[in-house]
Image: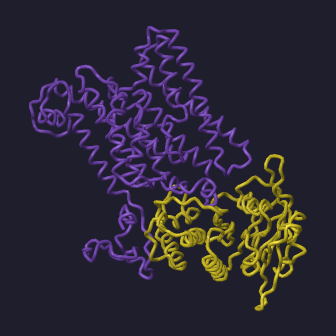
Amino acid sequence: MLSFDSLIVRYGRAVALDGVSGRLAEGEWVGLIGPNGAGKTTLLNAIARLLPAAGEVTICGQRATDLSRRKLARLIAYVPQRPLLPPDMTVSDYVLLGRTAHVGYLRTETTADRRVCAAVIERLGLGPMAGRELRAMSGGELQRVVLARALAQEAPVLLLDEPTSALDLGRRMEALELIDEVRRERSLAVLSAIHDLTLAGQFASRLMLLADGRVAAGGRPADVLRDELLVPYFGPAVQVMTTEAGEIAVISRRLPAAGRSGSA
Amino acid sequence: MTATQPRQGQGQGQVQGSSPAAGAAPDSLRSPEPPDQPASAVLVRRIRPGPAVAVASAALIVAVLLGVAIGPAGLSVPQVFDALAVRLPWHPDLGVSALDTAIVWQIRLPRVMLGVLVGSMLGGGGAAYQGVFRNPLADPYLLGVAAGAGLGATFVIVSGANLALTPPVAFAGAVAAVALTYLLGASAGRGGASPSAGSATGSMLLAGIAVAAMLTALQTYLQEQHTQILAYVYAWILGGLSAATWSDVWLILPYVAVSAIALLAHRRLLDVLRVGEAEAATLGVNVARLRLAVVAAATLGVAAAVSVSGLIGFVGIIVPHAVRLTAGPSYRVLLPVSMIGGAAFVVLADIVARTAQAPAEVPIGVITALIGGPFFLFVLTSRRARQDF
């Protein structure tokens, strides 16, 4: 579905991405984890071709560099970490922007486009708010609105950059469950940067640990969320635990002053 | 409640959680369910510019009629309408004098029509530039149109050539200046690390400032070398429609028409750009191509307008913002209404320019700023302030 091979991105002299490779199958959710500055957002931007990157990205058998913006947008939908939300735009107008790649260059949306958006709005429980302006929405609602726009693109690949970082714990869980549901319904390949390691382990089928622009580890959550892999990058305060229900939780402990001085 | 009421006919409580007024919404206000969407309760409606366009068009028609009716010759309104009718293919014998016909058809009408064309380009060009550069302070002269046209006009005046050459040379100067800005800005923007961060837009605006400064310096130098022509140069730069003829109208009509059609064709894409260049790109927009197309179209029209009218300031920035505040920020509304509104505004300003101190004329740029400023402040304060753009 999506594969990327030896991606290299430089910001001036600094190397932000240093030969990162990976692949996602249909319906698979891969979580990108790693400390700040590891290159998670850069990787997503490189895949979405928002940055000049060396290496190759292939989606559904087509090289990304061979595709026009339109064609690329029909294959990849991207939810940025801090989307720009015109406050006076209504929810339905905003979701309709997701149809851009399906509308002819100088044409306007058809009834079919509108129907797709109406269905997505309904599916995400935004129906009663469809006519509301974005300024009147809460953070959790806005997260769903942005997801709705991405789903309206009807792309098989969904890139999410920290989709829940602005939400409280309860809303965060709801949002991820919703993403998981639509992923299954539509067999989406989801690649998401995600800060919260516990949530990453709960939702992603595979994890990719990025550090300093390289893949430090990859595999099933149980294989990646291990003290010896995480501590070198997140510091000695991080501790992996297994709950009674068998779920992996990653917590951070407060260390005595002596232990802190030795942190990376 | 009122703060979240949808505008532009996007639903009358159908998609709202609650009824618009306490139990008193008449049934006629509720839109019927369209037959093509029976299953879903959610209505994703079209943005309709219709009402705003109708209001602006009515204003334009009034402005045009006033523009033809008012003048120093002291014709009565019936006389003016008779004189207008005389040129129609079938008309009763109205006994209109040849002089009256000439005043209306050769002096007033071409001047009003030129005002319509010039105003539509300044209003529409301003809206388009604000959209494509995502900058509320953008005006149609942003990328050097004014400086280029001014240099061209000054050059013709200084060289002692036939003044009839002023429009084409000013047009060439304006287009060349924007082309230079565009090339410099685009190449500087490519050097940036991140094309997604809007660096191309930023460097283009900066290139525009540099090009305008250089060309203005050249123009100032030229005019200081020939102080005897200062009055001509200033008259041109301050702008005016006093020398308008039908040939001016026919000269710029093709450019204005092509520009208006091209700009209107991009209205939906300018709406997409409201979420930023990077997000627009992930939605499938080729931002560089969109920017080039809109800048080229706007430049063509604005340069043509400037070449015959000089530099009429203020219109391109004030009209789109007044429209935004009253009719909403969607470019599907903003572009057509700014064109029509800009035309009405320039025609009205020109009426004031030629009557305020008759028989002398006040430069129209002075009028646009003097009556436009208070008008805009009125709109700004009477509406809730919008932080967004």
Seen in the picture, residue B380 relative to B283 is either above or below; the reply is: above
**Chain identifier, yellow in the render:** A
Residue sitting nearer the eye, A215 or B175: A215
Seen in the picture, residue B89 relative to A169 is either above or below; the reply is: above
Give the residue drawn at x 29%, y 72%: B21
Relative horizontal placement of residue B159, taking residue A215 as reference (left or right): left
Coloration mode: by chain
Residue sitting nearer the eye, A259 or A11: A259
Residue sitting nearer the eye, B49 or B197: B197
Percent position of residue A49, x then y: 72, 57
Percent position of residue B227, x then y: 47, 9
Relative horizontal placement of residue B65, taking residue B229 as reference (left or right): left
Seen in the picture, residue B377 relative to A142 is either above or below; the reply is: above
Labels in figure, total = 0
Residue B377 seen in render: yes
Percent position of residue B12, x then y: 34, 70
Residue A6 seen in render: no
Relative horizontal placement of residue B50, taking residue B201 as reference (left or right): left
Seen in the picture, residue A62 relative to A8 is either above or below; the reply is: below
Residue found farthest to the bottom: A244
The quadrant the N terminus of chain B occupies is: bottom left
Residue sitting nearer the eye, B109 or B150: B150
Quarter where residue B19 is shown = bottom left
Percent position of residue B316, x then y: 43, 39
**Chain identifier, purple in the render:** B
Quarter where residue B16 is shown = bottom left
Give the residue drawn at x 42%, y 19%: B234
